[in-house]
Image (cartoon, grey):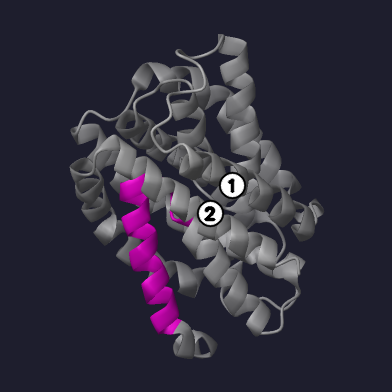
């Protein structure tokens, strides 16, 4: 625990920002937690592959309480589409379990490259056409939704993130209103985080991990980040409710742009 003491302010900031973004954008906070943990662990001397495993595992564990808080707040506001969840949860959960189990075998460079390019593409499209209509006027056929759900679950659990980044982009592309897309994605984040964190904790501890790491989950970082993220998630929900859909889309796009650039910078 003492080796993390100098980094507590950084972890506190990550927790507060993660919770705000969880409520505001429906992301589980992983887009903040994973880069911060990655910087901390590689600075300590861990290899990038091992550091990414601990960063993603810890992030998934943090997302569990954060997503519960965010999902509850969104449900109270009527932002959760239960019919959509019935279609998406089974294939997404199955893909999450597969991805979490295979995580140690996937090179970090491949994940960083794929994720960085994807979010940059989505961000640039939203920034160039912030008020553009959906890609399609309605949700696609069920089998297409199942395929999308499985792909999103697999990628998200490997990256240690909730469903906000990919889920909101997919929902809004098919004419789901942005506030309902954010609320539904928050619930999907919980579906990703629970099995993902449990399976991450069952893996062997990567070499060079800090003390009190169980599998891929670092307990001190979890204890610092999670309470703050839970406490401020409802604040993000209230802030998002005050923003018009176009402004919320713009915030989402700028956020994705910054995350994508940072992920790609790890490859240089």
Q: Position of residue 7 (x, y in %)?
A: 47, 84
Numbered disc 1: secondary structure: helix
Q: How many marks?
A: 2
Which quadrant would residue 96 be assigned to in this image?
top right
Q: Position of residue 44 (x, y in %)?
A: 65, 85
Q: Position of residue 128 (x, y in %)?
A: 50, 41
Q: Is residue 188 above or below residue 247?
A: above
Check disc 2 and report the residue beneath it: 257
Q: Position of residue 233 (x, y in %)?
A: 28, 54
Residue displayed at 25% across by 60% down: 231
Residue 224 seen in the figure = no
| Label drawn at residue 119 | 1
Residues in magenta? 8-30
Q: Quadrant of the C terminus?
A: bottom right
C-beta proximity under 8 Å, tags 1 and 2: yes
Q: Is residue 131 magenta?
A: no
Residue displayed at 65% across by 32% down: 151
Other-residue count near label 1 (Cα within 10 Å), few / some / many at <14 / 14–19 / ≥20: many
**Nearest the camera: 214 or 265?**
265
Residue displayed at 59% across by 19% down: 146
Residue 9 seen in the figure = yes
Q: Is residue 30 left or right of residue 52?
A: left
Secondary structure mostly seen in magenta is: helix
Numbered disc 2: secondary structure: helix
């Amino acid at each position: 625990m003492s080796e993390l003491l100098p980094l507590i302010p950084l972890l506190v900031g990550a927790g507060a920002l993660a919770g705000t973004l969880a409520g505001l954008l429906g992301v589980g906070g992983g887009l903040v937690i994973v880069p911060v943990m990655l910087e901390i662990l590689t600075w300590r001397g861990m290899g990038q592959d091992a550091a990414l495993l601990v960063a993603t595992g810890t992030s998934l564990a943090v997302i569990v309480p954060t997503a519960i808080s965010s999902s509850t707040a969104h449900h109270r506001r009527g932002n959760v589409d239960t019919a959509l969840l019935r279609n998406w949860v089974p294939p997404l959960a199955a893909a999450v379990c597969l991805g979490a189990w295979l995580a140690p075998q996937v090179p970090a460079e491949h994940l960083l490259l794929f994720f960085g390019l994807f979010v940059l593409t989505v961000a640039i499209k939203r920034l160039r056409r912030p008020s553009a209509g959906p890609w399609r006027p309605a949700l696609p056929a069920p089998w297409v939704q199942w395929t999308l759900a499985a792909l999103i679950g697999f990628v998200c659990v490997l990256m240690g993130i909730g469903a906000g980044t990919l889920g909101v982009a997919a929902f809004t592309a098919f004419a789901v209103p942005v506030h309902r897309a954010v609320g539904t994605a928050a619930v999907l984040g919980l579906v990703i985080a629970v099995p993902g964190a449990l399976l991450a904790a069952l893996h062997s501890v990567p070499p060079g991990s800090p003390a009190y790491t169980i599998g891929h989950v670092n307990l001190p970082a979890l204890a610092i980040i999670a309470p703050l993220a839970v406490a401020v998630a409802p604040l993000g929900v209230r802030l998002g409710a005050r923003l018009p859909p176009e402004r919320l889309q713009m915030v989402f796009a700028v956020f994705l742009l910054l995350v994508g650039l940072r992920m790609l910078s790890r490859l240089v």
